Structures are given as structure tokens and as C-alpha cells.
Image: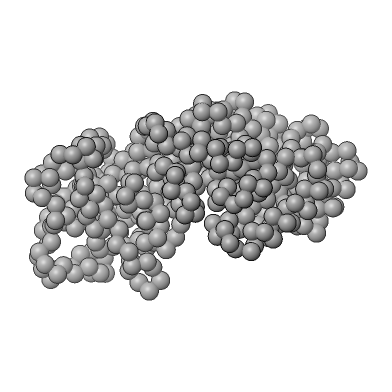
Amino acid sequence: MDDRSKDTQTMTNMLARAGLLTVDLGAIVGNWRTFSGIARNAKVGAVVKANAYGLGIPAVVSALFDAGCELFFTATVEEALNVRLYCPSASIYVFEGLITENVPYYADTNLTPVLGSIADLKNWHECAPKDAPYALHVETGINRYGIEHSRLQEARTFITDTQCPEPVLIVSHFACADEPENPMNNEQIGLFKRALKLFPNVAASLCNSSGVFLPAATHFDVVRAGIALYGGRVTEQTTQLRPVIRLAARVMQFKTIPKGQSLGYGAGYLADSDTRIAICGIGYADGLIRAASLKTETTNTKTIVGWIGNHAVPMIGRISMDCVVYDVTAVPKEILEQCAGIEVLNDRTTIDDFADAANTIAYEVLTRLGARLERQYINTQS
């Protein structure tokens, strides 16, 4: 048995539940350091919203903070309060917009709201302690929460007239940074630079994961690293980033279905020969997107494969709520006799491969991985 087979066997023997999600904290830290090297003159903050993209705020934030990360970005106050437990001195920015009832949390735990409307700016000025920090989100073309470019002068005038403290950060967000040649990138950069003229001494942040690979002039003061920290593909240039997760599924049963018999809901798979199958006990209730197994005109026709050691085994039939099936006919009998589980996701069937098959993105694959999966954290060095 080769090293990869031993590794898979060791991992699957640990399955206390139907699935084991192994998260490599060393890889996440390594990806953050890689981004820091690319950004050079900009600080690299970690986006840890949605429970650190589904991988667990406690472990992920602790690892990044211990490695020197001083900036974190969340979507909600609840997430930010959780992050604060593991990084007492870091700056934490919250993107949910201002909810008046949450203002005390910002003040008590030194959180920084990212305000994206004139109304929220005025509300913050009225409700928050005088010197409490805040950031401004300005609109440059993605048309989500943010102060419209036409109203930035109004924001500037309000801050000056009321002697409101200056924001600590001006933020915007690329819409098409994963397409480096898209003309919208330059349009957004131009609008962002115009906005910064109204706030000349304030730090600025425009780049997301993809934006880091645009010209260095777009890095400004702060870069926000998200999906790339967790091993997702953001551009063709990110091959230097390390994969972060492995997902192993416990085999519930091996059996053979005869030629001509169907498999799964809708009888969507028909065996063209006697087929040895492995039935694994995870499914879309655990986050395996059902569309990855449905080959229709609107989904990718790529076949997803799992792994038993170095043996690739194709997924067949439809993903069910608690079940996914693989064709293991080609795997030698002596290996199957020792097999307790199949790797569903790893460095060879990546979150992007699974996303492609489901006609979605790696973000969705990661953030769907469910609470029923046991989580194990390791720390490998690059």
C-alpha cells in the first residue's frame, strides 16, 4: 500500500460519523503568507464570514492570528463576536450594515462597522461613542450595499459639518477581478480613486482574492483574502496556493448490481455491465450539491470521481439526502477488503472540480459543508 493509500486508510478509520472533513490549518496560513508576499506593501486581511467559509472560525482564526494576521472581515456582528474570542487585539470589520440594536456590541468589543449608506452613517454618528471607529463602503459598479458615487460628497460634507471622526477605512469591491482583461476592472479602479480624493488620509481597500493578481497599484493599503485562503481557484495564477480540505465518506455497503439494473432516484443510472458499487453515508444534507450528479443541458457533464488510495472511482446515480454512490468495479478486491471510506474531495478532486460539475462556484461548495460532518484539524508545513 503506497503512502496515499495508508493516509486514506488512517483517515477513514477515524470516521465517527458518516463523513470526516480534514482542514489543513497550515495550508490556510501558507496561503495567507503567499498573499502577503504578493501584496507586499499592503496588509492582507482574512475574510472569515460564514464560519470561515464553513471550516470553523475558532480553529481558522486562531491559526491566522497566531501567524500574524491582524485584520479580519465578517458578514455579521454575531460572527465578529465569535472571531473576537480568538484574536483579542485584531481589527475586525463587519459588513452587515448598521443595525441599531448592535451598536453596543461594536463599542464593547471594539468592532468596526462598514457603513454603506448615508442613513447608516448618520445613525452611527447619533448612536455610537464619539471616537468609535467605522469604515465606509463606496459603490464602484458591483451595485450591492454601498454609498453611491453621486452621494459621496454628501457623506464628506456630513462628516465635516458634524465633526464626525474620519473613517478608518474606505472599502469597495471588484465585480470582475477574476477576469483580468475585463474593462470593468479599470472603470472601478477609476471610480475608487476618485472617491479616495474626498478622503485623502484614509486607508483604502479594493482587492478581493482575485484582485490581488491585478496590477500592484490596485492593492492600496489593505487586501481582503477570501476564497483563495481556503484553496479555491480565483484565477489561473493561483496555482501556487495550497489545497486546504479533504472530505472522506464512510462506506456503508459494497454490493454488485447486475447489468441492466438502475440505480438511485429517477432510475437515472443504468448499469451497462455487472457493476461493483460503494454506498457512502453522506449526501446533500451534508453539503454535497445534488446538481453535481445531474447531467442535464444546464449542468456540466464532467464526471466527479472519488478516491480509494490512488484509484479514481466515478460517482454514479443521483446524490441523495444521506447517500452517494461510487463505481468501484476497477478497484482490486484486496484493496476494497481494507477500505472503510472514500475521499470525496481532496487535492485531486477539488472544491472547484465539484463546483464545475454542479454549475456553481467553490464558495458554495465550501459553505454548504454541514454540521453532521466531523471536523479534524491538522497543521502541515509548506
How many labels, in total?
0
Instruction: Pick the quarter of the image with the C terminus.
Output: top left
Examine the rendered structure and indicate whether residue 153 appears above or below residue 81.
below
How far across and how far down the image is residue 23, in percent? Answer: 38, 38
Query: Can the viewer see residue 285 in this picture?
Result: no
Examine the rendered structure and indicate whether residue 183 appears above or below residue 198.
below
Which colouring convention does the figure follow? Answer: one colour
How far across and how far down the image is residue 300, in percent? Answer: 37, 66
How far across and how far down the image is residue 58, in percent? Answer: 48, 32
Which residue is at a point 80% across and 53% down the rendered structure image?
152
Which residue is at a point 43% across and 48% down the rendered structure image?
239
Is 314 positioned to the left or the right of 78 in the image? left
How far across and how far down the image is residue 318, in percent? Answer: 28, 62
Is 97 positioned to the left or the right of 320 in the image? right
Foreground residue among 183 and 21: 183
Foreground residue among 137 and 198: 198
Instruction: Pick the quarter of the image with the N terminus.
Output: top left
Foreground residue among 56 and 371: 56
Q: Residue furthest bottom?
A: 297
Query: Can the viewer see residue 354 in this picture?
Result: yes
Which residue is at a point 84% across and 53% down the rendered structure image?
153
Residue 269 location, quadrant: bottom left
Examine the rendered structure and indicate whether residue 269 appears above or below residue 171.
below
Foreground residue among 248 and 217: 217
Residue 371 location, quadrant: top left
Which residue is at a point 42% across and 63% down the rendered structure image?
359
Examine the rendered structure and indicate whether residue 144 appears above or below residue 219.
below
